[in-house]
Image (cartoon, rainbow, N blue to C red):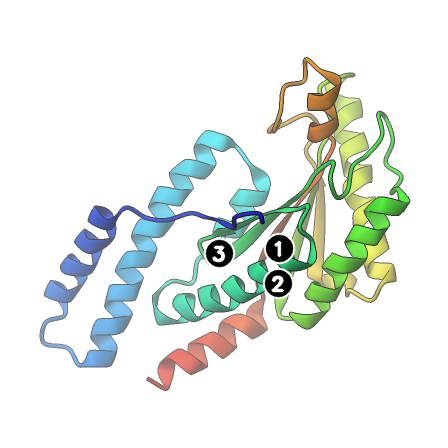
Amino acid sequence: MRKLNVYLLSGALLTGALFTSCNSVKNANNKQKGAAAGAAAGAVLGGVLGNNVGSKNNSALGAVLGGVVGGAAGAIIGNRMDKQAQEIEQTLPGAQVERVGEGIKVTLGENTVNFEFDKSDLTSKAKSNLDKLVKVLKDHPDTKISIYGYTDSVGKDEYNVKLSRNRANAVKAYIVSKGIGTKRMTTEGMGKADPVASNDTDAGRAKNRRVEFGITANEDMINSAQKEANRY
């Protein structure tokens, strides 16, 4: 069974953030203390993972970390995303699922949505796997979905960006045809950026011809989480 990848903070950083926060609000009530502690932890999380994004230059990961709510509401969103990530992994075992911050990064590689060389057409296998993902996305309508297409390194950069955009758009068009609202989604072609394998072999290039998803909370989820947090 695949293991769900989760980005974790070091205990020292998190403890330090919470200690500083609690000292700064030592005269506040419990609700205020909790919110401040959560905000401090969220700030550390954003900083640590933001550095990670910078080193990887990965747009799907960047999208997931781009709208950090933080505090108690952020924790509630995180719990909801935990559930959705687990559902995706169970429903689509060939995908690489990563819980990052308050969002989810999903990589659909050659085991799920693989593209043939110089093609943006979805294979029957790709459609079958996307059908499985669509079911989870329908069960969680309060999310935004960023779709990123990729190519291998063969060919000119300009052409590869266009080809990768066509791949992302092909995935979007298919899942829209299955009932996912188009307003929930954005697409972008990344060309040969962020390879996940060596482009020196056929097998490696096949892995790089992929699609990645960044799944984040929409305004409805954020508002719901904030209302829930304010009740405590």
Residue 12, percent from left and from top: 20, 47
Within-10-Å neighbours for mark 2: few <14, some 14–19, many 20+: some
Q: Identify which amino acid the numbered label 1 is placed on.
A: Glu
Q: Are marks 2 and 1 in contact (CB under 8 Å)?
A: yes
Residue located at (37% from left, 49% from top):
8
Farthest bottom residue in view: 231
Q: Which residue is mark 1?
A: 89
Residue 100, percent from left and from top: 47, 51
Distance of mark 1 from mark 3, alpha carbons?
Answer: 23 Å
Residue located at (62% from left, 24% from top):
197
Residue 189, percent from left and from top: 72, 36
Q: Which residue is mark 3?
A: 67
- Does 149 sit left or right of 221 as displayed? right
Within-10-Å neighbours for mark 1: few <14, some 14–19, many 20+: many
- Does 228 sit left or right of 147 as displayed? left
Q: Identify which amino acid the numbered label 3 is placed on.
A: Gly
Q: Are marks 2 and 3 in contact (CB under 8 Å)?
A: no
Q: SS for tag 1? A: helix
The tag earlier along the polypeptide, 2 or 3, is 3
The tag earlier along the polypeptide, 1 or 3, is 3
Residue 92, percent from left and from top: 69, 53
